[in-house]
């Protein structure tokens, strides 16, 4: 404990740098696998190695850190694993852009040199976000930092791939996939973002092969893919086309004949009820094609140009857009374009580069999700149904079940170079044989003995390695490691798996959370986490999504520079209401910066009023403490119970509000003022009587212990300022980060004391202060009042608490009695127990009446044009709803102010008339 007087102004930057360095130096966040304490573990949702801290990261990691610090202070052996994701496509794109500035591309470098270049970039520029997370105060075990391409994690990836392949749950197949022409890779279904787009619907005539004068008209949004059509489909019950089913039509611009088929999937109400079937370039058409054994005609290249085929002719080499325009022109020339109309439809875009995704036939690797005998999805569904995994809030369960119960096989291969290369090799002498899947490169082909082997060039989807994160980061599989590391990994897994809680945003519930559930249950035979707390998104103050184009992006690093990290953390916690997006406004952050300043100033006041050398000696007994001491102690323990309960339920917002209410309103606004009465009554050295001296010591002790407790309570949310202040007060550890968290003592909660102080002191003082404001009586002017109690108990209670009321309400010596008569020209303050009469001279009353009448006249002038607008039918019938709503609010505010002025005038006039 240090009794140095604090600096006058709180400097967050200096304090934050100091404590980040201290925590790391002291290894306060390092978890010991062998401990007799209960374990609590979390894995950080690994940010991309390319990433920089944004407000979403700030929210996610603030909430995680609150849990980690709270649990650590409650005696848990806490492991919070930090790390980064190699982010295959995103990172490769960054380095490719870097190469482009040098006039190079990856193919010129070659795979090996390109990967070396990415590693160089990772070592020099990657990982910025982890340094920024330290600045945020994240209490991770930084000695256990992981990266998804670390040797240990790479071994886990290979182990999982090989095992799943051996079980028949990983396979290779030619299918229609989502293809990004920009990233030049396959994408899984959930890596495609669908957005509504305005386009056109083209109606094209397909002549019958045997009766060219008869035509069947189809409707399509993609006329250029017509070149890959292998059928026209109609509904089997559509009477318009019954006679055409089984006949052939001539594909426009090609002369190729294709059949008319019947399929129940066709929507008779869309377009003409007849649709073109392009199995190689549309997912719905692929299903029809397989059902009817239609050929697949691939007419596109990987870079979204038309391929050179027997059908594409003059269109080969054109971009999709160029081919579309040319095909439409040519159809019109031949009289086969039946019509064009505006049409809205969903367009899929790559989640990384936003390029339009093309359905494309390709051979890829897949994870079989719903194998009838060995399902990955079913156990993950059951785990949530049986509450082995709790989704918090529960309202996310229907979304989870809906997706998991309709889940498709997962395409896991990507045609890029940065990532986990697929552990499969092809024998060059047996090109048509199945690849050799193995943990290590095979020396020769097990079938023919050839040593000419080539590894599959594709890498695994980034989410494949991320799905293993809860157990791969803890050393799984431990089997192939040296004895020392093997033992440590086994102990880590035993102590910290399953992890306790996962904090994540809803947008990766399916990308990541569901896949971790499947992999954890399959390989560890246990859920990967007990609780999943799902927070919402951070938006701007108006609820708009943040984007650079809108200019509404809030940079958390800039916010931390301006307002301090604790202010940002507290804001995010206070606004983290379940199921509601965080509408982040700078004004709110500034408000919590003021909260930090108020805490700092409270500490300065307390330190200046504590005895030299601090509070010493035994704690005062109950009889020695003042009513104010008993009141704040009771409120403190009530707050402790509420805060612990809120954090237990992941109600970070409720915990923050309880802390704010207790610290700002109860401790600072009331208790510090009440304590001054007991602290500033003289000193023992100058003849202070024994009772006053005892009370002064008791109040100093209560001040110190209460402030120390609230620093402990606040620490998980505002770690920096609380650490800095705690140095000056009694504590049980070298850092609050490892000090015990307060627990509520029910015996110290006293509802009677709370009610008495609330009714006798607080309500009386508030009402007298309000009356001062209404009558423009300066706060410094002492008031001579009479207090008329309802009965003897009320009179005695007021006498016992009179010193507090006198000081806080600025009263001269009041007269206290029972059922006292109302004096002439007096204002009255009513509470449940007393009437407080405040004499007011007539001159002051008349002056106030004059002021109020002028204010009323001014208000009427403001109200008049507003009322005229409501009489104007032109405005009322034609103005937008938001304009009318704004007018209604304006009128209601003015009317409320007028009613208040009118009431004050009535009361003051009654006072004068009553005295005449």
Image (cartoon, rainbow, N blue to C red):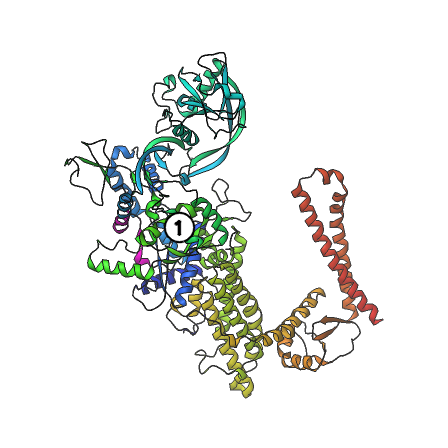
Q: Residue at 41% across / 34% down in the picture?
A: 355
Position above or below: 574 against 802: above
Q: Nearer the viewer, residue 870 or 480?
A: 480
Residue 575 falls within the magenta-colored stretch: no
Q: Which residue is mark 1?
A: 380
Q: Position of residue 670 (x, y in %)?
A: 58, 71
Q: From the viewer's perspective, is 47 left or right of 765?
A: left
Q: Quadrant of the C terminus?
A: bottom right
Q: From the viewer's perspective, is 895 left or right of 180?
A: right
Q: Exactly how many numbered labels are in the figure?
A: 1
Of helix, strand and loop, which one carries label 1? helix
Which quarter of the figure has residue 302? top left
Q: Nearer the viewer, residue 331 or 514?
A: 514
Position above or below: 257 against 600: above
Position above or below: 712 against 385: below
Extent of the magenta region: 141-157
Q: Position of residue 811 (x, y in %)?
A: 67, 75
Q: Position of residue 529 (x, y in %)?
A: 38, 56
Q: Nearer the viewer, residue 581 or 712?
A: 581
Which quarter of the figure has residue 25? bottom left
Residue 257 seen anywhere in this rendered image of the structure: yes
Q: From the viewer's perspective, is 641 left or right of 82?
A: right
Residue 846 seen anywhere in this rendered image of the structure: no
Which quarter of the figure has residue 489? bottom left
* Mark 1, other Cα within 10 Å: few <14 / some 14–19 / many ≥20: many
Q: Quadrant of the N terminus?
A: bottom left
Q: Position of residue 301 (x, y in %)?
A: 35, 27
């Amino acid at each position: 404990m240090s009794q140095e007087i604090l600096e006058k102004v709180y400097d967050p930057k200096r304090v934050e740098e100091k404590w980040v360095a201290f925590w790391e130096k002291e290894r306060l966040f390092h978890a010991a696998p062998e401990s007799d304490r209960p374990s609590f573990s979390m894995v950080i949702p690994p940010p991309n190695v390319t990433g920089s801290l944004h407000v979403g990261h700030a929210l996610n990691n603030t909430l995680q850190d609150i849990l980690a610090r709270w649990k650590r202070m409650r005696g848990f052996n806490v492991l919070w694993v930090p790390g980064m994701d190699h982010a295959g496509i995103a990172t490769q794109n960054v380095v490719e852009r870097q190469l482009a500035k040098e006039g190079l591309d990856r193919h010129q470098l070659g795979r090996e040199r390109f990967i070396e270049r990415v590693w160089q970039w990772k070592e020099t520029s990657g990982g910025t976000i982890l340094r920024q997370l330290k600045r945020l105060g994240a209490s991770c075990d930084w000695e256990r930092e992981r990266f998804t391409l670390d040797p240990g994690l790479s071994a886990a990836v290979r182990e999982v791939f090989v095992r799943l392949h051996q079980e028949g749950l990983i396979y290779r197949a030619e299918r229609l996939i989502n293809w990004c022409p920009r990233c030049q890779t396959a994408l899984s279904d959930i890596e495609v973002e669908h957005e509504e787009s305005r386009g056109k619907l083209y109606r094209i005539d397909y002549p019958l092969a045997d009766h060219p004068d008869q035509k069947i008209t189809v409707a399509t949004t993609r006329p250029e893919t017509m070149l890959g059509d292998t059928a026209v489909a109609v509904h089997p019950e559509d009477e318009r086309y019954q006679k055409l089913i089984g006949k052939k039509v001539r594909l426009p611009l090609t002369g190729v004949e294709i059949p008319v088929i019947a399929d129940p999937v066709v929507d008779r109400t869309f377009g003409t009820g007849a649709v073109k079937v392009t199995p190689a370039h549309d997912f719905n058409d692929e299903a029809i094609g397989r059902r009817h054994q239609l050929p697949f005609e691939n007419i596109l290249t990987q870079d979204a140009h038309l391929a050179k085929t027997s059908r594409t002719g003059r269109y080969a080499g054109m971009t999709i857009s160029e081919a579309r325009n040319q095909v439409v022109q040519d159809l019109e020339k031949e009289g086969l374009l039946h019509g064009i109309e505006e049409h809205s439809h969903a367009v899929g875009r790559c989640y990384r580069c936003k390029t339009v995704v093309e359905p494309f036939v390709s051979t890829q690797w897949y994870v079989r999700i719903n194998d009838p005998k060995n399902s990955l999805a079913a156990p993950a569904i059951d785990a949530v149904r049986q509450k082995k995994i709790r989704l918090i809030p529960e309202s996310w369960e229907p979304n989870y079940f809906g997706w998991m119960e309709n889940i498709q096989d997962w395409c896991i291969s990507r045609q890029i170079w940065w990532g986990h290369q697929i552990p499969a090799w092809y024998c060059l002498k047996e090109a048509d044989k199945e690849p050799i899947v193995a943990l290590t490169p095979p020396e020769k082909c097990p079938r023919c003995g050839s040593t000419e082997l080539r590894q599959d060039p594709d890498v695994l989807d980034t989410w494949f390695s991320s799905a293993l994160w809860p157990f791969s980061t803890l050393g799984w599989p431990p089997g192939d490691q040296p004895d020392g590391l093997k033992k440590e990994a086994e102990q880590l897994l035993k102590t910290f798996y399953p992890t306790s809680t996962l904090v994540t945003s809803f947008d990766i519930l399916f990308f990541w959370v569901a896949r971790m559930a499947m992999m954890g249950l399959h390989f560890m035979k246990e859920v990967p986490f007990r609780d999943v707390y799902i927070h919402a998104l951070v938006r701007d103050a108006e609820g708009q999504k943040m984007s650079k184009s809108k200019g509404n992006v809030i940079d958390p690093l800039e916010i931390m520079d301006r307002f301090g990290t604790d202010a940002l953390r507290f804001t995010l916690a206070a606004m983290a209401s379940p199921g509601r997006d965080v509408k982040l406004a700078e004004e709110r952050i500034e408000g919590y910066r003021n909260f930090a300043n108020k805490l700092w100033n409270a500490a300065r006041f307390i330190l200046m009023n504590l005895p030299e050398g601090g509070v010493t000696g035994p704690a005062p007994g109950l009889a020695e403490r003042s009513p104010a001491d008993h009141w704040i102690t009771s409120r403190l323990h009530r707050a402790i119970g509420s805060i612990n309960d809120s954090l237990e339920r992941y109600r970070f917002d409720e915990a923050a509000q309880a802390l704010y209410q207790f610290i700002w309103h109860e401790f600072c606004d009331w208790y510090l003022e009440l304590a001054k009465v007991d602290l500033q009554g003289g000193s023992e050295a100058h003849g202070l009587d024994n009772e006053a001296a005892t009370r002064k010591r008791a109040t100093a002790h209560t001040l110190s212990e209460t402030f120390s407790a609230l620093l402990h309570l606040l620490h998980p949310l505002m770690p920096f300022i609380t650490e800095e202040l705690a140095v000056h007060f009694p504590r049980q550890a070298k850092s609050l980060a490892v000090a015990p968290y307060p627990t509520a003592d029910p015996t110290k909660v006293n509802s009677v004391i709370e009610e008495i102080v609330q009714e006798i002191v607080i309500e009386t003082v508030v009402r007298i202060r309000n009356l001062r404001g209404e009558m423009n009586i300066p706060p410094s002017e002492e008031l001579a009042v009479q207090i008329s109690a309802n009965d003897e108990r009320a009179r005695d209670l007021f006498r016992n608490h009179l010193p507090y009321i006198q000081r806080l309400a600025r009263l001269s010596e009041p007269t206290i009695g029972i059922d006292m008569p109302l004096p002439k020209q007096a204002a009255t303050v009513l509470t449940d127990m007393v009437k407080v009469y405040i004499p007011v001279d007539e001159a002051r009353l008349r002056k106030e009446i004059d002021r109020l009448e002028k204010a009323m006249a001014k208000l009427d002038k403001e109200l008049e044009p507003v009322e005229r607008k409501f009489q104007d039918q032109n405005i009322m019938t034609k103005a937008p709803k938001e304009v009318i709503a704004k007018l209604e609010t304006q009128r209601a505010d003015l009317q409320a102010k007028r009613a208040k002025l009118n009431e004050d005038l009535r009361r003051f006039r009654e006072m004068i008339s009553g005295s005449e």
